[in-house]
Image (cartoon, rainbow, N blue to C red):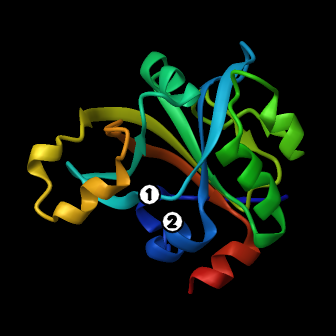
């Protein structure tokens, strides 16, 4: 899919729809070394922090992708149109420890323009990020007690902030964001 480069400062998105309805694929690792993993994510944010365009993702410590996020300095976030919903379900419900879930999902990894982690040929939006901060969720700081219901195993997420180094999107994706 052809994507147009976008200055991250000019990126216009519908973030709640992107995270809550469309979902994203988080990929961390090194494309050239063939050492990376991807997972579907539906919680996060995109905006400005510390005078930088950023995206924030959360990853539970038990996820295979967590080790890649810890080891590597960069990651990517990719969005796909609704025809890829089955592929995103595979990436969100299967572990990369046990199988080549990216191949099982029928997606094609390819080099990103600025970071080591890959993007996907089929993605209609690709964000390339460099980690700039992390922190662990502290349940003692939840002001809404219902939040803790998301953690029956007490496996609280680690939050990763990434500066958006590059962005690209298809014409179709950009039209839907207006």
Residue 43: mark in rendering? 1
Residue at point 85% right, 58% down? Answer: 1
Indicate the position of residue 164 as horizontal and vertical percent values. Answer: 44, 47
Task: Say above or below: 88 vs 59.
Answer: below
Residue lying at 82% horizontally and 54% vertically, measured from the top left: 122
Residue 163 image offset from top left, x and y in percent: 38, 43
Distance between the alpha carbons at the discs numbered 2 and 1: 6 Å
As helix, strand or loop, the secondary structure at mark 2 comes to helix
Q: Where, by quadrant of the figure, is residue 16 drawn?
A: bottom left
- Can the viewer see residue 24? yes
SS of the residue under disc 1: loop
Nearer to us in this view, 162 or 141: 141
Tell me which corner region of the image, top left, top right, bottom left or bottom right, holds residue 160.
top left
In this view of the protein, can residue 107 be seen by the observer? no
**Viewer-closest of 118 and 65:** 65
Q: Residue at x 36, y 46 (%)?
A: 152
Tag 2 residue: 19
User: Is 116 situated left or right of 109 in this image?
Assistant: left
Q: Is residue 18 above or below residue 175?
A: above
Q: Which mark is drawn over residue 18?
A: none
Instruction: Work out whether mark 2 precedes mark 1 in sequence or the reverse, and give the earlier one.
Output: 2
Badges 2 and 1: C-beta atoms under 8 Å apart?
A: yes
Q: Residues within 10 Å of mark 2 (few under 14, many from 20)?
A: some
Tell me if 144 is positioned left or right of 32 in this view.
Answer: left
């Amino acid at each position: 899919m052809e994507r147009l480069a976008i200055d991250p400062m000019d990126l216009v998105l519908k973030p709640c729809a992107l995270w809550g309805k469309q979902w994203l694929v988080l990929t961390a690792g090194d494309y050239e070394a063939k050492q990376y993993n991807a997972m579907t994510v539906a919680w996060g944010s995109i905006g400005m922090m510390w005078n930088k365009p950023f995206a924030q993702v959360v990853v539970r410590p038990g996820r295979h992708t967590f080790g890649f996020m810890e080891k590597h300095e960069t990651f990517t976030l990719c969005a796909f149109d609704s025809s890829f919903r089955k592929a995103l379900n595979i990436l969100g419900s299967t572990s990369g420890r046990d199988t080549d879930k990216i191949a099982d999902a029928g997606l094609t990894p390819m080099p990103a323009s600025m970071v080591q982690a890959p993007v996907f040929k089929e993605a209609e939006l690709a964000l390339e990020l460099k980690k700039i901060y992390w922190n662990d969720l502290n349940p003692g700081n939840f002001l809404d007690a219902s939040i803790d219901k998301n953690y029956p195993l007490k496996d609280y997420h680690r939050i990763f902030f990434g500066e958006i180094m590059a962005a690209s999107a298809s014409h179709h994706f950009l039209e839907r964001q207006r």
